[in-house]
Amino acid sequence: MTKGLITSAQNTWCPGCGNFAIQHALKDVILRLEADGIPRERMVLVVGIGCHAKMADYLNINSFYALHGRALSFATGICIANPDMYVICCVGDGDAYAEGISHLLFAAKRNVNMTVLVHNNRVYGLTKGQVTPTSPVGYHGKSNPDESEEIALNPPELLLSAGCSFIGRGYSRRREELKELIYRGTLHSGFSCIDILQICASFLNIGEEYDGQVYIPADHDPQDFDAACRLVREYSYGDGERIALGILYQAKREPFRVGTPVREQQDTKKGAFVLQFIQDRI
Amino acid sequence: MVFVNDCSVLIGGKAGAGINRAGQVIARMVTRLGYYSYMYYDYPSLIRGGHNFSVIRASPHPVGTHRSGIDILLALDSATLRLHRHHCKRDALIIYNSDATKSETGFGVPLNSIVQKNHGTSVMENTAMVGALASAIGMDWDDCADVIRHEMHRATETNLAIAGDAFRMQTEKKEIPRLPQSPGILLSGNEAVSLGFLAAGLDGYVAYPMSPSTGILHFLAGASGDTGIQVFQPESEIAAVTMAEGMIYAGARAAVGTSGGGFCLMTEALSMAGMAEIPITIVLAQRSGPSTGTPTYTGQSDLQFAIHAGHGEFPRFVIAPGDAEQAYLWAGHALSLSWQFQVPSILLTDKTLSEGVYTVSPDLLQEETPDEWPVSVPRWDGQGEYQRYCDAKDGVSPYAAPPLSGTVVKGNSKSHDSWGISVDDGMQIASMARKQMKKVPFMQEAVSKLSPVREGGNRDADICLISWGSNAPLCREAAQIMGIKSVQPIVVHPFPASEMIAATRDAEMIFLLEDNYSGQLADICEAHGILVDIRLPRFDGRPTSIDQVTEDLWGLVG
């Protein structure tokens, strides 16, 4: 294993995959956090299952390669036991918006102190092109060849109603903005979720369309909830709709905590409780 | 009328009338009189209106099961009289609420009037009944008042006044003479599991409510303020188990608890604990299945499921304590064994144990607490670069939780190399599988050191009665009565084959009683060459009474 930030694991993303851009943006953010004085060992990456998840193999930081859909609940456990960790989750759109949507909404509701990067390529890549909750209307893979259509889910809108305290949108072909957005997310105290639009080089290569849709809104105040609602509704994953990038919403809210962090717990108190309980029953 | 040996009290009423609470107060009264007590609580899955009852047994000897015949029937309503009168012995004392029902036999106490006179609430009718009982069994008022003060912290004075009035009105007696012994304290199975976890140093407990495991969640949540432990109820069982595993990755000794349905949802993460070598302890409190089954009635039909749950092959412990004392000890052992080998452990209880109340000697609890508790989290020595899954003689890699200065901790649910990096290569997959599975003989050895099989009754007898879980105290007592031998495997996986074979070697006839249809432990015994002559299955959700089992066995052995 290398000493740098990239491991020696062989990279198996397709040429042109949007994940490369996210990986390098995340790597740069980690270096920037280190430069800010946050030691690398206090960062941990939790991933789900899908193409995005290979990030855990490729980045030389603490990591846990979890189950499909369950990265956020696993990461919540880390946040509970050790609130000093900087917890970053890389998850996919099938991963977090389908299988694991309940954990996403509840992590937002609780304001668990973590940063979630949704690698939203709007298609299942690793399982060969099936439809996801945010696939374009009219998208047909091998699993939905007939003509029936579902509308796309709008997860940022859902997250807003779940009480999410930081919602951002990034785009893998706007690296500098993406880096800044992830950095802001990691510094946010509480739950931050960044929906990152990325192309899937094999199954949904729509970079040119995105290039024409994305923009950075002028004079947007991220603390304005109604303005945030307007921005997330402006793009409901439809073709040709305008896509606002950057921090769409940010609010101050007390982060989630449970009991006493593990390193501060004292076993003597537990033993004393048992003895006292027995004594009280006599 | 003085009773000599063993006394069973049944108190019944509508759901919401505080029958469980009243039963516990009665159990406490009889332990104060020097008797070992056991309480079975029977209730349907509803909040108000159905019929609930508690059976409290008092015995001069340790007991962990109920009797069929009732010595004292306490009826808060007419349904109790109707449903349980025919369980009463000929000389039974019946006390009934004369404001709610009429009866030609028994002694009527106007519970509603007493409560109203003292400006109490309707739930306090059970207090009045307890007062009447105390008088009937010949308890001193001071003793009775002491128990009420101890058990009822809210509206204590009102409760005392109500109990006092009923105590004075009750004139018919069925005395329980005081014995010169102090048998111990009352603990439910769920309380015992919770205390065992705490004594072993549990840091966190995450659970979604599900009967009959919920008592552990309530107990530990109540203890979190004093102990600092982290207790949380998340959005689902899937969230519960994955959160607990995240806590363990971060260095916490964490456990979860559920019943069959929730355990089904947890199996994917159980399998992850196998692959990622996460030492999680799961309490599986069984109830009748399949599916939602009967939420508040017992069952032992998840034994094979617990042993085989989760896809793929990985080592695990499955441990089935039989009473509160064993639940205390083996909850801690489960946590300890998990951490020793970095494998999941399943503490398999059942409704009878979880919600049953047992008498436990406080001294015994302290004597039995192993010196190794609280369980230490083994630590990596810090030399060189950390490899989460490096090979070792016993397959157990040194444990470390982040943050580690200058090195990383990579856990992985996929096939991985020693660093925790995913692999697809056949040789590496096989090598990691070998590393994980070579723990098994060492796990067997560790189990053997903990006396995983308990024998009772007449050890020299050639008739042997095997049982597991909450049926163990029942069969132990039956064996004592009948002069046969009882055998209980407390650890059921890895199966303590040599101990079980040794315990049954001289048996010419083997019975096996368990609460499932197919005989799941019997199949396991037979797979290890222990032939079970007669299986005694029960699958109606009800626990077997000592009278039923001895009657059946007398019929079979002649």
Image: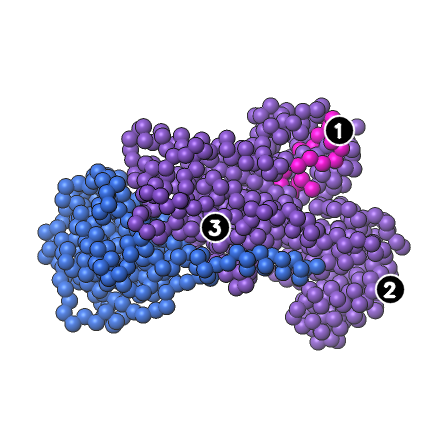
Q: Which residues are magenta?
A: B454-473
User: Would you name the residue on which mark 2 appears?
Assistant: B171
Residue B295 spot, x, y in % from top left: 57, 49
Residue B151 spot, x, y in % from top left: 69, 64
Answer yes or no: are tags 1 and 3 on the same subunit.
yes
- Direction right: furthest residue: B1
Q: Which chain is blue?
A: A
Q: Is residue B428 magenta?
A: no
Q: Mark 2 is on which residue type? A: Thr
Instruction: Tell me if residue B430 comes above or below residue B282 in the rendering.
Output: above
| Image mark for residue B52 | none
As helix, strand or loop, the secondary structure at mark 1 comes to loop
Determine crowd level at label 1: few under 14, some 14-19, many 20+ residues with C-alpha closer than 10 A. few
| Residue name at image x 79 percent, y 70 percent | B164
B322 relative position to B389: left or right: right
User: Would you name the residue on which mark 1 appears?
Assistant: B460
